[in-house]
Image: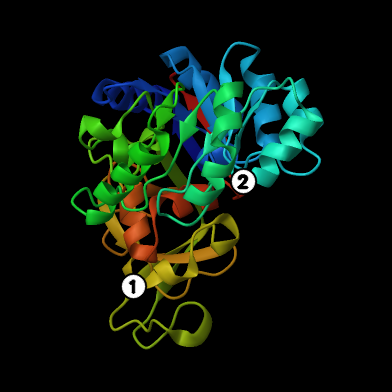
Amino acid sequence: MAEAELHIDLGALAENWRRLAERSAAEAGAVVKADGYGLGLAPVAQALARAGARKFFTAIAEEGARLRQALGPEPEIFVFGGHMPGDAALIRDAALVPLLNSPEQMTRHLESAPQAPFGIQLDSGMNRLGMEPADWAAVRGRARALGPRLVMSHLACADAPDHPMNARQLAAFRAMTEGIDAPRSLGATGGALMDPAYHFDLTRPGIGVYGGLPFAEAQPVVTLRLPVIQTRDVSPGESVGYGMTWIAERPARIATVSGGYGDGIARGMAPQLAFFHDGVPCPVRGRISMDLIGVEVTHLPEPPEYLELLGADQRVGDLAQAAGTIGYEILTSLGQGRYARRYTGG
């Protein structure tokens, strides 16, 4: 049987990064955590490096070490999670830059990897990672003397540019970093699309590079096609799938495709989800199961060999809306599926 195929257009990915870099009044880095948002860490990062990215961000040191193997010695690789217990060897050997999130992490770093560079992550109001003002005040002098490679924070509401939280965080970040002689960074994709006041010395494009919102002008990067295993005719009154959640009101032709929630296609999408064939929408019928999905193809002239879930007709944001989630979760979930990855461009 033909494989389900996740097509990744590295050329579109690189172009999205270039457009976001052009929108930035500062240098643009690239966020490649979670295996390059589920699309493959090495090919994604290498395409972005060829496009001009020189600073990369991962979530944990193990990701950073794999990224160093893929990119070689030149780019700077920052680790959002900072310096966790047991990270010292990875940080030294892979020349990583942990973004220290607490006085405890600073102590750990200076004791176990004293010659290794570091950055600082500040909490400007998101209450997720980073040093709060009191903690930062306690270590600021020492950090400043040692020369951090980057001082950063993260916006909580950048996908809503007019949200008052953005201005509050901008003011807090400015106050916390006043007089610091180090590059500063506040905005990721959403921040890069906002006023240049949010750009500082470095922006950190992430989801927009991969074709997701809030970068509405992004080119689609991912196409997902699922093979049809079997097609059957269903009579009025017959049901499809578990729980009899869909019952045919008229004669229907149902294609069963190879894929399901075991491949990152969320079960809750079913009522709103459609597949596409040559631009024609084909609605899901019944529940999404672990490995199989029923799709109505009555209106197609012939039974299809494949149906497309993600591509030009249905973008990452559309799937996120159907699932009641965000594009980040869609991409990273699909990236864990049993798909053959096909790379083009870049």
Q: How busy is the neighbourhood of tag 1: few (under 14 within 10 Å), some, or many (20 plus)?
A: some
Coloration mode: rainbow
**Residue 113, how many percent across, how many down?**
77, 27
- Give the percent coordinates (x, y) of residue 62: 71, 36
Left or right position of 279 against 17: left
Q: Position of residue 221 (x, y in %)?
A: 39, 34
- Residue at image point 44% right, 48% down: 306
Residue 226 visible somewhere in the drawing: no
The reply to whether residue 183 is in sight is yes
Foreground of the two, 121 or 303: 121
The one of 305 and 81 positioned closer to us in this rendering: 81
Q: Which disc, if any, is residue 252?
A: 1
Callout 1 secondary element: strand
Q: How many marks?
A: 2
Quarter the C terminus occupies: top left
- List the residue tagged with mark 2: 102
The residue drawn where x is 30% and y is 47% is 158
Q: Earlier in the sequence, mark 2 or mark 1?
A: 2
The answer to whether 24 appears left or right of 260 in the picture is: left
- Picture quadrant of residue 20: top left
Q: In 3D space, how far apart are the residues under numbered discs 2 and 1 (Cα atoms)?
A: 60 Å
